[in-house]
Amino acid sequence: MKSLTPFYNPSISYEDNYAQGPFGLFAQLDKSQQIPTKPATFLNIDVNLPFGMPAGPLLNANYIKAAFAYGFDLCVYKTVRTKFHKCHPLPNVLSVHPKGKLSCNLDTVLADTNYNQPISITNSFGVPSFSPDIWQPDMADAVQSAGHGQCVIGSFQGTQGHGEIEKDYALAAKLVHETNAPILEANLSCPNEGASKLLCFDVDKVERIVNAIKTAVPDRPLILKLAYFPDNERIISLLTHVGTIIDGLSTINTLSAKPVDAKGHPALGENRKEGGICGNAIRWAGLDMVNRLAKYRKEMDLKFVIIGVGGVSTSEHYRQFIDNGADAVMSATGAMWNPLLAIEIKKSL
């Protein structure tokens, strides 16, 4: 498959992408087309197709408007915080070349700028955020731009060091709610402090965060963004604690690895020896998590929706996730390099 120009430019800074993007076809909205679909619902909201983009590539309202125009009907506005948070320096996105699939054991992988299909990339930004006075009006603009059967999901996270973490999550949820985003997504899955310290593995803390969010914003569906859980015990524990309180689970975010250059040096710099990997190499993990969540959802008689994410770049991948139990599917890397992906999936159905 030939790569199109990615709508996010990996060779320039996050700030420049925010100000100048999106690029490629996403800057040419006259080339978009809407494909008729059978109506569906997602968390009681009408959607044309339960397919879209997860937290990450859609930096602001300009990106979301382009994604909607190209038929991505569920669009997650990039994760925001209660205060300004700086982006990691370049490089943030590099192509990685694992031999086959990536394991969940912190593999060492070659990273460079050869973005060949099937594509896998580093995702090393540090969850940057502008301050609420910038992102709130922009998110509100994005929410307003949704067409028929389309929906913005507002992603947010708390920040360590801003008092009790659950209070910062609750404040972030409140600020997102003020934009009129119809669905909230709390990010619990970023490997900022090393893969062993992911927030979603601290079930007691997750429960406190979920309760604080639901108290602050009781009238919006809440999705939790999860990482890959290697063992079933942690999944069961999480579902036992919050399975009846939350409305959806989105999984996965990334798998952590050690990207190195051709000389074996850390490709993201000495201060970032590890980084999250997205794209083709992690699809197995996304499918596996969806499959296990669907199994335990049924066994425990729970009602939450499942959003399948990870390495989706074809209509066949979309169907695999649906067949494994996903209620919705999202693509980040695949969509970045192929802005026509939603149109292709709709044509295939």
Image (tube, rainbow, N blue to C red):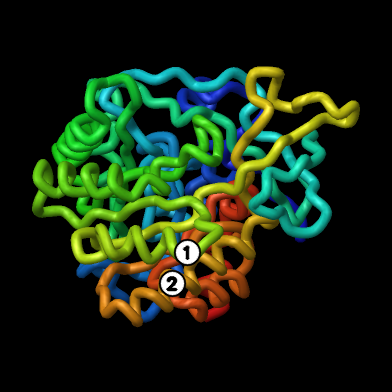
Q: Quadrant of residue 250?
A: bottom left
Q: Nearer the viewer, residue 187 or 114?
A: 187
Residue 179 x %, y %:
18, 39
Which residue type carries mark 2?
Ala
Is 298 left, or right, of 189 in this rendering? left
Residue 45 x %, y %:
23, 66
- Residue 212 in view: yes
> Which comes sooner in the sequence, label 1 or label 2?
1
Q: How many marks?
A: 2
- Residue 39 in view: no
Which residue, given by chain and number where applicable, does mark 1 sit on? 308
Q: Is residue 243 above or below residue 106?
A: below
Q: Residue at x 44, y 44 (%)?
A: 189
Q: Residue at x 68, y 57 (%)?
A: 280
Residue 54 x %, y %:
44, 51
Q: Nearer the viewer, residue 82 or 343?
A: 82
Which residue, given by chain and number where applicable, does mark 2 sit on? 326
Is 185 left, or right, of 92 in this rendering? left
Q: Residue at x 58, y 22 (%)?
A: 13
